[in-house]
Image (cartoon, rainbow, N blue to C red):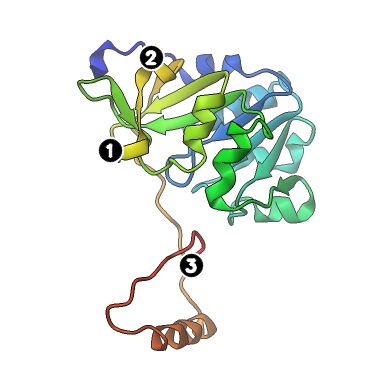
Amino acid sequence: MHNNLQFVSADQAVKVVKSGDHIHLSSVASAPKILIDALIRRGEAGELKDVRIHHLHTEGEAPYTDPKFEGIFFHQAFFVGGNVRKSVQAGYSDYIPVFLSETQKLYRSGALPCNIAMIQVSTPDKHGFVSLGTSVDATLAAIETADYTIAVVNENVPRAWGDAMIPMSMINFFVEDNTPLEPAHFADPDEIECAIGRNCASLIEDGATLQMGIGA
């Protein structure tokens, strides 16, 4: 099935983006770096303006938040991670306060438009389905409501099941890139953070079930 896909380059795929569009990027390790880089090249060439970019936490760099792209790209974050925090604090990006469970409603209700969904997926199976892997969250709703969906097909994306499985027919453009996924980056805890961790651990009983938030 993979051999039957008609791939285009990242630069060709992002030509569908026009000024004023709202773009959703898949989250965490699934951020489609090759598409982001191609989008940045269009911005640097002066081909775009007033493009809004939405996503939850992403690993890796977020070059569209650079102040030099003011008037070209504007990031509206569902989650303020380390790679966009300074931009939000400086006013070059914005934060949309929303519960994680309600991010899909923003797209499905029409409260937030989605013109382009840029995602990263697994290779297709014999039934013609790909997996969203590490990023279902708001990404599924973005795909359902987007005018166009551009997917990076990457053999390193894990095959998650359930709502993560989507038919290839939901995707308009396929770009191949087998670059390893961006790992999570954690700083070594300092003495105070270790003390906080020990205090929290003392409150947890054997056999307890823990719910871990994104920031954990």
Q: Which one is in front, 125 or 194?
A: 125
Foreground label between 2 and 1: 1
**Mark 2: few/some/many CA within 10 Å (<14, 14-19, 20+):** some
Q: CA distance from mark 2 to mark 1?
A: 20 Å
Q: Amino acid at mark 1?
A: Arg
Residue 47 rendering spot, x and y as whole percentages: 71, 18
Report x, y in % for residue 179: 36, 35
Check whether the beta carbons of the residues at disc 3 and disc 1 lie within 8 A of each other. no
Residue drawn at point x = 37 percent, y = 37 percent: 163
Instruction: Residue type at mark 3: give it.
Output: Ala
**According to the image, label 1 marks what residue?**
159
- What label does residue 187 carry, if any? 3
Instruction: Tell which circle, 3 or 2, labels the residue nearer the N-terminal end.
Output: 2
Query: Which labelled disc corresponds to residue 176?
Result: none
> Foreground mark, 3 or 1?
1
Which residue corresponds to mark 2? 7
